[in-house]
Amino acid sequence: MESFACVLCDYTTPNKYDLTRHKKRKHEKKEMHMCDFEKCKYKSAYSANVRKHKLTHNPDKNFKCGLCAFSSHEKGNLKKHVKAIHSNDTKNKCEFCEFSTHDIGNLQKHINAVHTRTITYVCDQGTCNATFFRSDTLKNHKARIHNIASVVWKCSKCDYASLDRSTFRRHEEIHNERNSNMQTCPIKYCSYSSPYNFNMKQHLCVIHDIGPYQCELCTGKCAKLTQWKDPSTQKEYGVCRKCYHKVTGHKTKVEKQIVDWLHEHFKHPMVVQDKRVMGDACLKYRPDIMYSCGETKLVIFIEIDEHQHKYGNGSYECDEKRMSDLYDETPGSLVVFIRFNPHTYKLPQGLAMLFAEDRRKLLLSTINHIIENQKVLADTSMLHAIYICYDVDNPFIAKKIPTKVVYSIEHL
């Protein structure tokens, strides 16, 4: 993918217009235009940007979507939203994976952030030097870690905060007791609710795998098709999450890739691999991976927590109960849980996000560290939880169990 580099600094971008804008913003001295609304600190080198920004102070003039609760102060953003969310037009597909989008710009950002990683965005605050592969991720980092943002919208009824006014307004609706549009998840025993069709649709897709696609094995509807090759016929099928679990023994392709990688690089008998643990308590839990060292009575449970399990309905109490119950299945053993997040996460100041391969190496180093230091761990507690690449402020991290959040080998 072609990139454009600034001759005055290390900035690079796949978009020629972004380079021109960067030069004007960073290297040309221009008069700054300020927003004249009270307590607003927004400023820009371009008067047009300030005029657009002022519209955010008047939500009544927003352009609203007729199909969901989305609204924007720019008509172009509304057109993009309708095309991306509600249109059935042909999408731009990634040549490296199954990702697709209506916006060619989003496709270019995806390819750089996930596959090629030829363009990087580095935080310029002090000695931070945190590196990202998307400009918007860098912007969020600066706002969250260094408190650099035009406006941060904070909820008066909870701890929620957002850099985007439209997202914040959607959040406020959750606290509106008189909201007649509140929807409850139709799946039995699921308590999720939301006033927005889009949020409910996203919940059904992520949590329950319900969507518009048809599985080629069970013919049921699902949110995403995962490619599976039949080893006997070498024929490929697009299958739902449940069928993928049946034919491979893994819940997702990401989990399978990590387990296969550990098989190759960690030579140790695997007692349990996504199967029920039948111990003294007979609770029949299914950890993703379990390693057991019989001589030393050390048990390591590894859970592949995709997206840090943030889209579920539980809480840290639910996670603590599950870990405590599994601990009861192995009486007298030192039990260590490794909660591994293979997706994006928020970093402490001064750290850079690890690539997928480096993250797996960190997982392997963590396992070896536990084995080498099990006596030290046992002296403090017989139950531990180690979270790898979790958000610094993730609310699901256990509070009553000794925990450690790891971002590099130095944190072990």
Image: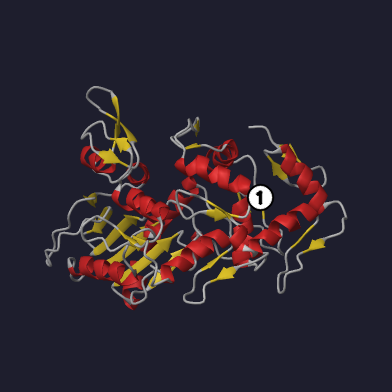
Residue 66 visible? The answer is yes
In-front residue for pair 339/297: 339
Residue 391 position, x and y percent, is 48, 63
Residue at 65%, 42% in the rendered image:
119
Residue at 57%, 43% in the rendered image:
79
Residue 180 figure quarter:
bottom left
Residue at 70%, 61% in the rendered image:
54
In-front residue for pair 23/340: 23
In-front residue for pair 54/375: 54
Residue 298 position, x and y percent, is 26, 63
In-front residue for pair 98/292: 98
Kind of residue sitting beneath label 1: Tyr
Image quarter of the N terminus = top right
Residue 207 position, x and y percent, is 32, 53
Disc 1: CA contacts within 10 A as few (<14), some (14-19) or many (>=20): many
Q: Is residue 60 above or below residue 234?
A: below
Residue 366 position, x and y percent, is 41, 58
For numbered disc 1, what is the local secondary structure? strand
Q: Which residue is mark 1?
A: 121
Residue 376 figure quarter:
bottom left
**How is colour applied across the structure in the image?**
secondary structure
Residue at 28%, 73% in the rendered image:
382
Q: Give the left or right position of residue 21, taking residue 276 as reference.
A: right
